[in-house]
Amino acid sequence: MEFNVCQICGAKDGRAGFLVANSVRNLVPACQNCDDTRRTGVIVIHAHLSRTEKELTKTMNILKGPVSTSVNSTINNTLILYAVRNSSGQYFRAKGYHGQGATWVNDINKAKIYGGTGGARGTITWMANAFPKYPILDLIKLTVSGIEVVDEKDRVLKTQIKKAKAEEQRKAAQAKRELENAKKKLAEAEANIKRLTNF
């Protein structure tokens, strides 16, 4: 017996299901998972189609287009950011309205970072007017270079496939419940007919 083989994920041995091809668009024969994924632009996994991890990965890779940057690649740009520091060497941390936690922190990674001088200088001016007895705050200029670009495609695609599988499983479970309810109602109806017939 000859089984279909998906030309994208490689599913075979009766697991591929029916294949979809399109000679006009030059699309190779693909299973429902791969065809729906390439057609819709989102990961589509049908619960009734059994797949190996390798086959699922190949389906996910359909959405992987050529990328100009990847993990550990760098952009040769320089980014200027700003922070506000007090006379004790602590950095201002924005808490928001009724926020919690310290206003001043030692770790600059926890500090409020401004994209321009306007917001930072506004904070310095407000603090100077509100607390005139304290020293004027410092404006800290941060020069960031060698920006690292992290490719998030694999993580996002895995999340999408997990979500798609969960949705298909939910639909399958719902269909199963509806079928069981229908069988129960049918059995009840048959019992009523039998009871009325034997009356």
Image (spheres, grey):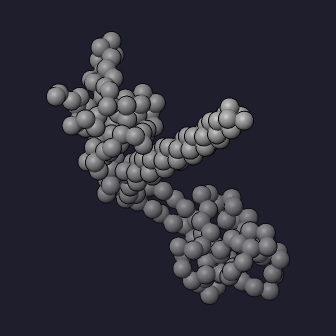
- Residue 63 on image: x %, y %: 37, 38
Name the residue at 35% across, 33% down: 34
Q: Looking at this view, is 51 or 74 the one in front?
A: 51
Q: Can residue 176 be seen in this view?
A: yes
Is 27 situated above or below 87? above
Q: Is residue 45 visible?
A: no
Quadrant containing the N terminus is top left
Name the residue at 67% across, 65% down: 120
Instruction: Residue at the far top: name it.
Output: 24
Is 14 situated above or below 124? above
- Residue 93 on image: x %, y %: 65, 74
Quadrant of residue 122 in the image? Answer: bottom right
Is 24 situated above or below 81? above
- How many numbered badges does the structure rendering display? 0
- Judged left or right of residue 103, residue 165 is left
Q: Looking at this view, is 26 or 34 the one in front?
A: 34
- Residue 20 on image: x %, y %: 33, 23
Quadrant of residue 67 in the image? Answer: top left
Q: Looking at this view, is 175 or 109 the one in front?
A: 175
Name the residue at 83% across, 77% down: 130
Instruction: Residue at the far left: name it.
Output: 1
Name the residue at 59% across, 58% down: 115
Quadrant containing the C terminus is top right
- Residue 80 on image: x %, y %: 52, 59
- Judged left or right of residue 70, residue 7 is left
Instruction: Residue at the far front: name it.
Output: 199
